[in-house]
Image (cartoon, rainbow, N blue to C red):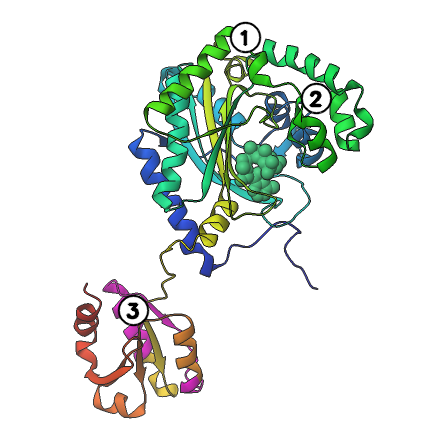
Amino acid sequence: MNITALKGVNDILPREIAKWDYLESCAKKVFSIYGYRQIKIPVIGESRLFVRSIGEQTDIVEKEMYTFTDRGQRKIALRPEATASVVRAYLEHKLEGQDLARLFYSGPMFRGEKPQSGRNRQFYQIGVEALGCEHPQLDAEVIILALEFLNKLGLKKFSLNLNTVGCTNDKDNFAKTLKTYLKGKLDQLCPNCQNRYKRNVLRTLDCKVKSCQKVIQSAPNMIDAVCPGCSCHFDRVKSTLDSLSVCYNIMPHLVRGLDYYTKTVFEITHADLGAQNAICAGGRYDNLIKELGGTKTGAIGFAFGTERTILAAEAENIDFPKEEGASVYIIGLGQASDEKVFELAQTLRKNQISCYLNYNTSRALKKQLRQADKLKHRFVLILGEDELKSNCILLKDMDKGTQESIEIKNVVSELKNKLNK
Ligand code: ATP
Ligand code: MG
């Protein structure tokens, strides 16, 4: 039997974990300074939650969602994103008394897309949602928060793209305007966009196919079509960002692939990534809370793709913390050392010194040393027959390449000293 991981569903191996932890810890530090609190939402939820919020005619719901019927005949989906679930939790638990709640999350999402670099079927997101407020300054806060996270990581080659899609009314009106513009040009659009034209015309603006982009280039702009209220909101967002000297590009054709977005939408792209260059996407969703049963109030959020952000950080040669092996690798030579090395490992662990022991006392010393080097252990303790007789042990410093014989009873204090514990 040869079972491998599913296509587009990756293992994150121990050697990669330091990077993932670093991303999460940077996010947590920045988000908590801005008053955001962590929430963990379930990986599965009722399908209709996602269908209702993301939109029936979106790529995610139509083509990408993993759904199944459980034993109670309930229609369940693996979450394709987190916003809908966070809103559900906010309403269900009356978070912050349903006043402004600042929340963040991180975890896996699932979409049945074609796997490629930067596009997986199980991928991770780190995101933020601020729920219960329509103030344009909140938009600026959330956007700045996303940028601050990247600053904290030490990234430089990213850019912020910004647009407004207006309110539901504006979106409906603009969809008509866009349809009129595209009507005579349908034959120049890709089959996907011909379909989008009928079902979700705004998405054509997002198409990456060259022939479509050519048509879209001269399409009317959303910014020119939004109502005075939405236009004023957007002006305030921009002026707040300006007042803090935040750089952004206005992208009049930027739309998001989910139906719930209204007013401000944004994405952050990275210069060193290929086709999948968006590391973060977000926007306002002022109707979603009401649609899911709450009172009408605004909200805004964003999500970073964790894998893509790591790719971007690697491309910029960010100084990630190094993976650390256990501090000490213990080698026992010959069966007689069995008990002593086991006992020693326990003593070290009790003294908060991490160690690795492989129980194989017949393995050649050379091989074990190579292994210790590969797994980046700082020290090696070797207990052979001679040492056993004299109650001593060899302590090898792998960084310095030195070794000394010390009395077993002094091992803990010696190591603590060397490890500055
Ligand atoms: P894209 O246009 O790349 O498909 P999207 O509009 O579907 O992105 P969102 O749903 O807004 O993306 O998700 C926010 C971020 O999550 C994206 O900017 C990206 O970094 C990441 N992301 C989305 N889908 C995937 C995926 N299948 N694999 C890896 N990362 C993803
Ligand atoms: Mg997508």
> Residue 43, how many percent across, how many down?
54, 37
Whether residue 228 can be seen here? yes
Which of the two residues, 142 or 208, is positioned nearer the viewer here?
A: 208
Please identify the residue farthest to the right as the structure is shown.
187
Nearest to N terminus: mark 3 or mark 1? 1
Q: Residues within 10 Å of mark 2 (few under 14, many from 20)?
A: some
Amino acid residing under circle 1 = Cys
Q: Quadrant of the N terminus?
A: bottom right
Q: Residue at x 63, y 55 (%)?
A: 5
Horizontally, residue 147 falls left or right of residue 186, namely left
Residue highlighted by disc 2: 201
What residue type is disc 2 on? Val
Could you tell which of marks 1 and 2 lies nearer the N-terminus?
2
Is there a contact, CB below 8 Å, between mark 3 and mark 1?
no
Q: Quadrant of residue 139?
A: top left
Ligand 1 shown in quarter:
top right
Q: Which of 109 and 382 lies nearest the eye of the viewer? A: 109
Q: Residue 187, how many percent across, how many down?
A: 83, 28
Amino acid residing under circle 3: Gln
Q: Tag 3, which secondary structure?
A: helix
| Disc 1 residue lies near ligand 1 with CB under 8 A | no
Q: Which mark is residue 411?
A: none
- Give me the disc on residue 227: 1
Q: CA distance from mark 1 to mark 2?
A: 19 Å
Residue with the most extreme top position: 228
Magenta range is 340-366
Residue tagged 3 = 346
Residue at 40% in and 27% down = 142
Q: Quadrant of residue 132?
A: top left
- Say whether residue 348 is magenta: yes
Position of residue 271 measured from the top left corner of the image (x, y, whole percent): 51, 45
**218 in the magenta segment:** no
